[in-house]
Amino acid sequence: MAVKKASVRDQVRRTLTERILAGHYQPGERLIELQIARELGTSQGSVREALRELEATHLVETTPHRGTRVRIVGVPEIREAYAARGLLEQAAATTAAAAFVNGVEELRIEVACILRAADAKDYPDQAAHVYTLHRMIVAASGNATLLRLWESLAFETWVRIRLGWGEINRKVAETSYARILAALERGDGVAAGQLLREHAEAFAPPAEPVPANSGA
């Protein structure tokens, strides 16, 4: 029974995580245990346990008299997340590059999807492909701990694009991604890592955010 209960809790946690990152729940929106339990056909206790785990990963926050809500992230925190993401991607690239020698076609597809979504101002789709592209690179490092740390920053990246600052400087983004993929394709993990770090720094939101020509 314990295994089954844990499995249900994990399923609820994954579903809520996906909904938050997909924008189904907006920053500041209250998550009502009973309502979610009814929607997912599970117990309120399983939802409560899942929300506690999400609170530990800073996706949600619980305050007295206000309940549990999707966490609101400020610009300084998003900037810090981008800087940290850049450092993690730089570390990952050193070993990930070997996996992409003469084989970056899947990455090219994701870059094309990012640019196409940006042109259409479909920011949720843009955020999804940005996540997929960068996750593929980090996962290729084979370092599960590094990947887990990187994934913990996905929420900040999603919020940054969803806030309406998703309109990108296409020329800068396209050039940046082309250089990153070229370095990976030739197996130069050091160069790819430096480029990934520079990419994260370049597309972090400015201290005073403006809607146009910001991040990817």
Image (cartoon, helix red, strand yellow):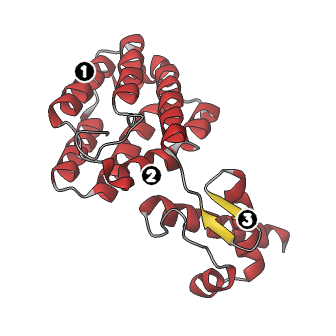
- Give the quadrant of the N terminus: bottom right
C-alpha span from label 2 to label 3 = 21 Å
Viewer-side residue, 74 vs 47 = 74
Amino acid, disc 1: Arg
Residue under the image location 36 percent in, 12 percent down: 191
Vertical relation: 5 (above or below) 123: below
Residue, disc 2: 159
Q: Pointer 2 and pointer 3: residues touching (CB < 8 Å)?
A: no
Residue depth check, mark 2 versus mark 3: number of the one nearer the observer: 3
Tell whether 6 sits left or right of 147.
right
Please tell me how crowded label 3 is: few (under 14), some (14-19), or many (20+) other residues with Cα within 10 Å: few
Q: Position of residue 180 (x, y in %)?
A: 30, 23
Amino acid, disc 3: Thr
Viewer-side residue, 153 vs 42 = 153
Tell whether 204 sits left or right of 30.
left
C-alpha span from label 1 to label 2 = 26 Å
C-alpha span from label 3 to label 1 = 45 Å
Tell whether 11 sits left or right of 203.
right
Residue, disc 3: 63
Vertical relation: 12 (above or below) 172: below
Amino acid, disc 2: Val
